[in-house]
């Protein structure tokens, strides 16, 4: 559904979108004679062309004299709903295909027009298919919401678990670094204490027990140091 904007540039946007659509589907290496047609179909809630009575407007590339370009790969189609609303509903047989589609789009969500929509579907096979799809979407709306909520909850739970794991990893890493630093400092202090105790034993003939006690060094490490120096 398209609405007219303040700067009235809808026609410019239409040309851009149909050209972009065509360019998107013409991939590198496509033979020029295999270039597909590109259709931009817009349902308008405003009247684009006041001077034309028909609500179905189809544009293609033409010469200024009116001659249609031979290839004419780009098509721009407008369906003006305000003109459709002014048309009488009956008889349906007098409505064109585009007018029937316009009526369907105007009344698709109108609960008071369901019988009329049914008659439209009987006259137009495409509308019958569209009505079936619309009904299926409506009937499955609650199921769709449940599925959406389930996915939302599952994704949220997964996110919470992931964030908790990441925080746990970060905390563990931080704790490990702190523990490693503490152990390193402790080992460094013990090494200095043991070296001081060994110097005390060597220079003053102190006993290992007295030297370890004076330098606050583990006796076991002092004895291992004496053994290694022997």
Image (tube, helix red, strand yellow):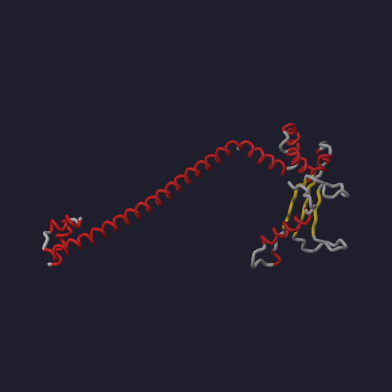
**What residue lies at 69% left-to-right and 40% top-to-bottom?**
131
Residue 72 coordinates in the image, percent (x, y):
77, 61
Query: Seen in the image, is 86 located left or right of residue 162?
Result: right
Nearer-the-camera pick, 113 or 151 = 151
Query: Seen in the image, is 28 located left or right of residue 210?
Result: right
The C terminus sits in image quarter: bottom left
**What residue lies at 73% left-to-right and 54% top-to-bottom?**
40
Query: Seen in the image, is 29 located left or right of residue 37?
Result: left
Give the quadrant of residue 214: bottom left
- Count of all numbered marks drawn on residues in the image: 0
Residue 51 coordinates in the image, percent (x, y):
88, 49
Residue 33 coordinates in the image, percent (x, y):
71, 66
Whether 1 is drawn above or below 16: the answer is above
Residue 180 coordinates in the image, percent (x, y):
32, 56
Query: Which residue is farthest top?
Result: 112
Give the quadrant of residue 28: bottom right
Nearer-the-camera pick, 204 or 74 = 204
Whether 203 is drawn above or below 10: the answer is below
């Amino acid at each position: 559904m398209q609405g007219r904007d303040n700067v009235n540039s809808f026609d410019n946007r239409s040309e851009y979108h149909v050209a972009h659509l065509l360019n998107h589907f013409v991939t590198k290496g496509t033979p020029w004679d295999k270039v597909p047609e590109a259709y931009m179909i817009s349902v308008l809630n405003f009247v684009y062309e006041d001077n034309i009575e028909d609500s179905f407007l189809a544009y293609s590339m033409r010469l200024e004299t009116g001659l249609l370009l031979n290839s004419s790969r780009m098509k721009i189609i407008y369906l003006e709903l305000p003109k459709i609303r002014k048309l009488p509903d009956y008889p349906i047989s007098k409505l064109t295909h585009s007018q029937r589609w316009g009526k369907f789009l105007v009344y698709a969500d109108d609960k008071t027009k369901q019988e009329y929509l049914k008659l439209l579907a009987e006259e137009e096979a495409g509308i019958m298919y569209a009505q079936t799809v619309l009904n299926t979407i409506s009937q499955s709306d609650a199921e769709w919401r449940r599925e959406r909520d389930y996915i939302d909850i599952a994704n949220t739970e997964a996110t919470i678990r992931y964030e908790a794991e990441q925080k746990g990893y970060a905390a563990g890493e931080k704790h490990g670094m702190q523990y490693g630093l503490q152990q390193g400092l402790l080992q460094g202090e013990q090494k200095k204490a043991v070296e001081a105790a060994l110097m005390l034993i060597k220079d003053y003939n102190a006993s290992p027990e007295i030297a370890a006690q004076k330098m606050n060094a583990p006796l076991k490490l002092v004895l291992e140091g004496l053994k290694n120096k022997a």
